[in-house]
Image (cartoon, grey):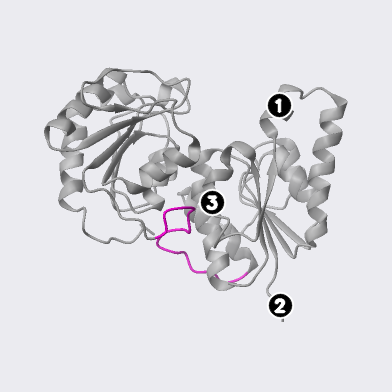
């Protein structure tokens, strides 16, 4: 009997796509020759490994579609793109996002069985059955995704997922990367504190690089490399993967670090760290309430010291 084919629908965001890679890897480990297609937005495609993990990627230009969302031509293009997934004749389809847009894509792909890990709006609730095997006690997104996959059969949760690029590439023992931004202002840590941490890490012998996107704050720190808004997502991913240490607020690069086994310090505020923390034991989550500013520079530096002392240990993911 041939392996069942699977469609994973996780359009965005960057960190969520990384967390979805654990479920994709679970499928790939059980079915090395199975057809696995991932439906993803163009801006997040760099988070999907196309050499060992997926058979192919269905890329959707949702940023362009959103700019013309009320155009009948845009609607028609979206429906054609989603319906084009039917050519794969999927046995299984899994929506790991749970929005109306992803539920519609899964519905039009027409797999023999389709399930969703969640339903966040009315249309999503109508389009896709929920994977009821996901226990309400399961909190972390990686574990919830894996529980949804297990509605199709028995799968083992891997320690780390298959990620793109840098297979066997050496880590730079002196490189510390800092991601200065986050998906919202409320999640950001004050930029001047990142500057203080960067200064202290430099004094401790690290070569520090600042990472961020076009809307992220800027700070000049002598002797620290500024790569804010200078790298593609793939280049940022590769730099994080080569790091000896990564520091970030609740944002996608923290999940990248966890997936590549890079020690990571994460600063949380309004988000639930039980659900959204980087999925690793080689990490420290700092949270002193709903405001990221409640976390001090000294706390971050103490966390980095602890992780550096454990840097050569191999520790499995939390279950």
Picture quadrant of residue 32: bottom right
Say which of marks 3 and 1 sits in front: 1
**Location of the N terminus (image quadrant):** bottom right
Q: Earlier in the sequence, mark 3 or mark 1?
A: 3
Within 10 angstroms of label 3, few (less than 14), some, or many (20 or more) residues?
Answer: many
- How many callouts does the rendering have? 3
Left or right position of 80 against 217 = right
Residue 237 image-quadrant placement: top left
Which residue is painted at 73% across and 57% down in the image?
114
Can you identify the residue that label 3 sits on?
Answer: 20
Residue 230 coordinates in the image, percent (x, y): 43, 27
- The percent position of residue 141, horizontal first and vertical second, equals 49, 48
Q: Position of residue 160 (x, y in %)?
A: 41, 59
Whole-number angstrom distance, CA of label 3 to CA of label 1? 23 Å
In the visual, does 62 lie left or right of 255?
Answer: right
Asked if marks 1 and 2 touch (Cβ < 8 Å), the reply is no
Farthest residue to the left: give it: 204
Name the quarter where the C terminus is drawn.
Answer: bottom left
Q: Which residue is mark 2?
A: 2
Where are the magenta residues, as a range?
153-167
Q: Which of the labelled discs sits on residue 66, or is there none?
A: 1
The mark nearer the N terminus, 1 or 2, is: 2
| Percent of width and height locating residue 138 | 47, 53
Label 2 sits on a secondary structure element that is: loop
């Amino acid at each position: 009997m041939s392996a069942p084919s699977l469609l994973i629908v996780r359009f965005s965001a960057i960190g969520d796509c990384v967390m979805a890679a654990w479920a994709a890897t679970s499928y790939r480990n059980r079915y090395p020759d199975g057809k696995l297609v991932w439906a993803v937005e163009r801006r997040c495609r760099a988070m999907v490994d196309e050499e060992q993990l997926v058979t192919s990627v269905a890329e959707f230009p949702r940023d362009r579609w959103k700019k013309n969302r009320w155009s009948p031509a845009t609607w028609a293009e979206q429906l054609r793109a989603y319906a084009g997934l039917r050519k794969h004749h999927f046995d299984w389809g899994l929506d790991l996002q749970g929005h109306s847009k992803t539920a519609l894509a899964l519905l039009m792909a027409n797999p023999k069985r389709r399930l969703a890990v969640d339903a966040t709006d009315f249309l999503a609730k109508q389009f896709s059955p929920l994977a009821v095997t996901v226990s309400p006690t399961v909190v972390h997104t990686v574990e919830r995704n894996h529980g949804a996959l297990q509605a199709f059969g028995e799968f083992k949760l891997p320690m780390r997922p298959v990620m793109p690029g840098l297979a066997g590439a050496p880590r730079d023992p002196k490189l510390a990367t800092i991601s200065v931004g986050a998906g919202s202002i409320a999640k950001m840590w004050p930029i001047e504190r990142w500057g203080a941490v960067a200064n202290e890490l430099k004094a401790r012998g690290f070569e520090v690089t600042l990472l961020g996107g076009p809307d992220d704050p800027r700070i000049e720190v002598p002797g620290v490399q500024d790569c804010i808004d200078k790298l593609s997502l793939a280049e940022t991913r590769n730099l994080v993967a080569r790091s000896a240490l990564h520091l970030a607020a609740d944002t996608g690069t923290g999940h990248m670090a966890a997936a590549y086994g890079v020690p990571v310090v994460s600063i949380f505020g309004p988000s639930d760290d039980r659900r959204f923390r980087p999925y690793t034991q080689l990490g420290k989550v700092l949270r002193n309430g709903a405001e990221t500013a409640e976390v001090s520079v000294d706390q971050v530096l103490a966390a980095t010291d602890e992780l550096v002392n454990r840097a050569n240990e191999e520790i499995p993911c939390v279950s």
